Amino acid sequence: MSKPLQIVAAATLGLALLTGAVRAQAQAAPATAPAAPAVQPAAPDTLPLIHGRFTVQVVGHGPDVILIPGLSSSRDTFAALVKADAGRHRLHLVQLAGFAGTPAGDNAGGDKVAAPTVEAIAEYIREAKLKRPAVIGHSLGGESALMLAAHHPDLVSRVMVVDAFPFYALIFGKDQTPETAARQLAPWRDGMLKSDDASWRKASAAQTLALVTAPEHQREVQSWMLASDRAVTAHAFFELGTTDLRPELPKIAAPTTVLYAYNSFIPLPAAVMDANVAEMYAGLKSVKLIRVDDSRHFISFDKPERFVAEAERFLDGR
């Protein structure tokens, strides 16, 4: 992996969720930073757990679409799309156990979150007799969408990945493996597990600055983090950083669209960014790469009209 690609990996595609999480716990906010507003944890998710791994809210009618939010995130990540869709599709809005006020369920045990949740979603598709739904995933949800399409190619029709990355640990160097990444990330995971409430609040406030632009959305995202189970978040963080999906990409038969954020903080020309993202996803047979300018990690918040337009094109098969 080239040096510029390492810079991109560190600066975009949601790597604040990897690097920012632990760094923010260890460092105080800069003296010039404004005081974080008081943020309350998001309201509890009262929907029933499915297979102990997630809840789902179903809205609308028509072709089925599964939407999977990211690390510590709420299904409200997709609120703009739900509103714009106006019931034309049957949207299955997933929220992972342990995130954003959803009870931890079976995600409280073991060190894997995404992988068993993907299997639970596959079982949900079968049990609900969904006919090869489209899948849209953001961040950890994007990685989950890729995993679902690779492990169960018969179950999905198409995939949209929103600002996600096949192997996040490449920020540490081109020779990274899941094993070397695990050695580097284990202390970070353990630090998250040991963090006290005050440090956790400070970390969550710091992370949101890199994830989304508008202060009101920063507070919303922080409320999700504060309502997330600490252990589930730590283990999902570790899993995200040590999972290499590049060998799985050739197994994906579904047409795939990748939206990726680009903004002035990324120290690369747009053309170099585009080439590097193409390198990341070279293993996909049928992929459309779409850069979204002037956006941070939560494209659906920073550029809602663009996000909705691209999602609608994706759902229409265009």
Image (spheres, grey):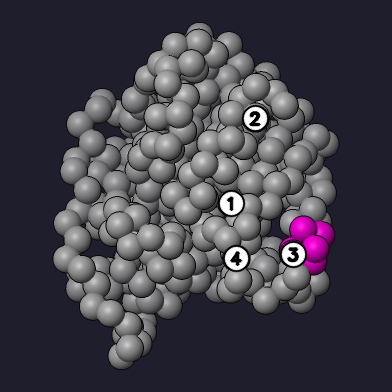
Which callout, 3 or 2, points at the residue further toward the start of the chain?
3
Q: Is residue 207 left or right of residue 10?
A: left
The residue mark sitting in front, 1 or 3, is 3
Q: Name the amino acid type tagged 4.
A: Asn
Asked if the residues shown at circle 2 and circle 4 are in contact, with their CB atoms under 8 angstroms apart, the answer is: no
Relative to 107, residue 234 above or below: below
Element on which disc 1 rests: loop
**Residue 158 screen position, x and y as percent:** 66, 27
The disc at residue 270 is 3
Q: Residue at x 20, y 31 (%)?
A: 46
The relative height of residue 306 versus residue 92 in the rendered view (above or below) is: below
In the figure, is residue 42 to the left or right of 280? left
SS for tag 3? helix
Q: Which residue is labeled 1 in the image? A: 163
Per the model, the C-alpha gap separating discs 2 and 4 is 23 Å
Contact? badges 2 and 1 (CB < 8 Å): no
Instruction: Provide the residue span drawn in magenta.
Output: 270-275
- Say which label, 1 or 4, has the lower sequence index: 1
**Viewer-closest of 166 and 291:** 291
Q: Are marks 1 and 3 in contact (CB under 8 Å)?
A: no
Q: Is residue 147 visible?
A: no
Q: Residue 263 bears which disc, if any?
A: 4
The amino acid on which the numbered mark 3 sits, given as a three-letter code, is Ala
How far is mark 3 from mark 2, CA to CA?
A: 23 Å
**Image position, residue 123 (x, y; %):** 49, 21
Q: Earlier in the sequence, mark 2 or mark 4?
A: 4
Q: Which mark is residue 314?
A: 2
